[in-house]
Amino acid sequence: MARNKLGDLQNHLFEQLERLNDDSLTGEQLESELRRAKAVASVASQIIANGHLVLKAVQLKEDHMNADIQVPKMLEAGDD
């Protein structure tokens, strides 16, 4: 299973931007790359939203350190 980090996502997004800036793309190649860019952006948005949710869970837990708050396992930050 892949162990990608948000830095990897940033690299993928910049690579996609570079492909879109390729002046040699024309017609169907350009249309295909635009569809790919939309798909990449959609997945990236979900990854970013998930990261934001994890961050909010960690912040909530830290803000209430004296309270007995159990953060659901799925929202805990990874140990990577």
Image (cartoon, rainbow, N blue to C red):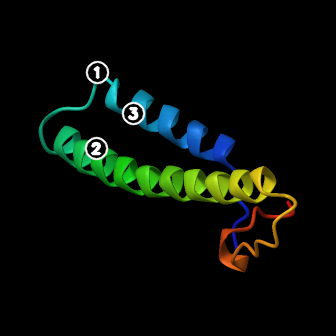
Label 1 or label 2, whichever comes before in sequence order = 1
**Left or right placement of residue 74 versus residue 22 in this view:** right
Give the residue at mark 3: 19
Kindly indicate the quadrant of the structure image that contains residue 61.
bottom right
Question: What secondary structure is found at the residue carrying circle 1?
Answer: loop
How far apart are the two marked residues, 3 and 1, measured between alpha carbons?
9 Å
Q: Is residue 1 above or below residue 77?
A: below
Question: Residue at 71% across / 50% down in the picture?
Answer: 59
Classify the position of the C terminus by image quarter.
bottom right
Which of the two residues, 24 or 20, is positioned nearer the viewer here? 20
Give the quadrant of the N terminus. bottom right
Are dots 3 and 2 in contact, CB under 8 Å?
A: yes
What crowding class fits label 3: few (fewer than 14 Cα within 10 Å), some (14-19), or many (20 or more)?
some
Question: Residue 25 placed where, x, y %?
Answer: 25, 31
Please rate how many residues cluster around mark 2, counting C-alpha atoms within 10 Å: few if below 14, some from 14 to 19, many from 20.
Answer: some
Residue at image point 59% right, 37% down: 11
Q: Give the labeled residue for mark 1.
A: 23
Q: Please name the amino acid that badge 1 sits on.
A: Asp
Q: Is residue 26 above or below residue 77?
A: above
Relative depth, front residue between 24 and 64: 64
Q: Looking at the picture, which amino acid does disc 3 mark?
A: Arg
In the image, is 71 to the left or to the right of 67? left
The residue pinned by badge 2 equals 33
Distance (Cα) linking label 1 and label 2: 12 Å
**Callout 2: SS:** helix
